[in-house]
Amino acid sequence: MRIGYIGLGKMGLPMARNLRAAGHELIVHNRSRAKVDAFAADGGTAAGTPAEVSSLADVVCVNVPMPEDSLELLLGADGALETARAGQLWIDFGTNGPDTARRCAEAGMTKGVEYLDAPVSGGPSGAEAGTLAVFVGGTPEAFAQGREVLDVIGGKIEHFGPAGSGCIAKLTNQMIIASVRAANAEAFVLAVKHGLNPRQLYETLMGAFAASRCMEVDLPNLVLPRDFSARFAVDLLLKDLGLALEVGRQSGVPLLATAQADAIYQEIRAKGWGGLDAAATFKRLEEIVGVEVVEPADG
Amino acid sequence: MRIGYIGLGKMGLPMARNLRAAGHELIVHNRSRAKVDAFAADGGTAAGTPAEVSSLADVVCVNVPMPEDSLELLLGADGALETARAGQLWIDFGTNGPDTARRCAEAGMTKGVEYLDAPVSGGPSGAEAGTLAVFVGGTPEAFAQGREVLDVIGGKIEHFGPAGSGCIAKLTNQMIIASVRAANAEAFVLAVKHGLNPRQLYETLMGAFAASRCMEVDLPNLVLPRDFSARFAVDLLLKDLGLALEVGRQSGVPLLATAQADAIYQEIRAKGWGGLDAAATFKRLEEIVGVEVVEPADG
């Protein structure tokens, strides 16, 4: 299959590589040309514009962080729509609002193009391993058409309903991880402030009802070793929280916990920590309180 | 060992039974006399007051929900302190504030009595199975002395530091489960409002970063089957959140997420749902939005 891939970032690059390794012909485009040439050097076609990608591909994948960039690459000047033809499929792996997904699906329909919103979860390591969770929205026909591509890049692939449903599903994940990380920081900073050993608390809470995947990942890998380099950055989480809050506002679902987490993350960004990992909720509260969630020197 | 047990409720009764089954001599007291007589009928001594319990026991266990009741039973009129003697150990299984724990420990010291705060997690089923997580605070001597009792009732027993440390550790668990349940409700109600299948979302999120023990327990057992009968009641969680917020206020740790969750649970109690399970965050938001997180009729 001829697969166009637009966006060779931390996620897109390993995903495109996996598709190439699975035997597909790749036509790639990226804002910075160097990544395109490097990719093509190992096999594949370099394209100068999304329209060029679209003119050569059966399936066009888009993988950029911001919804406005997805819109521009698909529907804008020199975008995929310009050269699209009936029977083509677009797959957007970015986490957008459902409005963006519906708008792209409708624009595609004018030329007989199918569209899937297919945001993923699992980070660069999941992208490399081809084990991403994929949250899919679109018509049953589009999902059937995209299945071969999705099976290469994902481990768990779930089709939730029409265009936009994948984005909603992904946003619920983001809402929860934001609130959980806000709560975890409060719990551990309070405990350390009162002299408790956070490693011992971590091991205990992971066996109790407070256990979560975020706690399991963040405490031993980021917080205790003091490594807040971004697996998933605050700036990107804030983009998702803004989309989730907008969906809630439009549909009359008041999201109090999400709004509180969003305010906490806005404070983190205001400190200049937007590029840190979303576990920076710990760093924020540690600074306020004047303690660090680290293992005691004598333990 | 002669073990006094004060408070034969949903948690205390199975814990006291396990201690009796382990071969200990039990001296029991409870506000309602019927439970005491029923327990004693199967073996053990019925006592009319905490002071009577204390006069006959090497270890006095207290297991009541409210801190003020712990204080009254240990330090009040006809309380355990009146007949306590040097070498005795008190173990308080209730979730109190650290101030209450320290006050009991200091009062006990005046008569040479050791004290452990030892709040538990795991619910009635964990109490019956003897697999509770136990969050312990107290001197190393008190912990060593209490170990034989704790090993009978608990599966994971962690000593966090001096008196009050067990309460702090337990409160961190409660803070987190409150925020997680608030966030989970927002995620699933938003998804259902937009037509997603909550069973499918549950299975997907449990494989993603949003996964948590609360989600794993609540969705299949309470929310989807519409059974909000209390495993752990909103009223009790609100008591714990009040204690946690007070600890935060006293020690200068601002707890924004916990405060938001507390406000949500106050709203739930104001609706008359204080006796429902803490998963009633779903019921609250479902009522506001006008949807239910149930499996679709056709699915």
Image: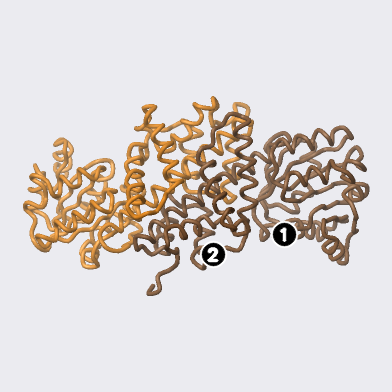
Chain colours: A brown, B orange
Residue located at (58% from left, 36% from top): B198
For mark 1, does the 10 Å Cα neighbourhood hold few (<14), some (14 to 19), or many (20 or more) residues?
Answer: some
Q: Secondary structure at mark 1?
A: loop
Q: Earlier in the sequence, mark 2 or mark 1?
A: 1
Using the image as rendered, state which of residue A114 and residue B156 is in the foreground.
A114
User: Camera-side residue: A225 or A267?
Assistant: A267
Disc 2 on helix, strand or loop? helix
Instruction: Locate residue A122, reporting x and y percent.
Output: 64, 54
Disc 2 to disc 1, C-alpha distance: 19 Å
Q: Residue at x 87, y 32 (%)?
A: A110
Left or right of A210, for residue B84? left
Residue A211 location (% of width, % of height): 46, 52
Query: Which residue is outermost to the top?
Result: B290
User: Label 1: chain?
Assistant: A
Q: Residue furthest bottom?
A: A298
Find out whether the residues at labels 2 and 1 contact each other: C-beta distance under 8 Å.
no
Residue tagged by mark 2?
A: A221
Q: Chain of mark 2?
A: A
Q: Is residue A170 above or below residue A226?
A: above
Kindly identify which residue carries mark 1: A10
**Residue type (three-letter) at the residue carrying disc 1:** Lys
In the displayed structure image, the side of residue A273 where residue B6 appears, left or right: left
Q: Quadrant of residue A108?
A: top right
**Residue A60 shown left or right of residue A237 in the figure:** right
Mark 2, Cα crowd under 10 Å, few <14 / some 14-19 / many 20+, is few
* Callout 2 amino acid: Asn
Of residue B10 and residue A171, the one placed in the foreground of this image is: A171
Mark on residue B86?
Answer: none
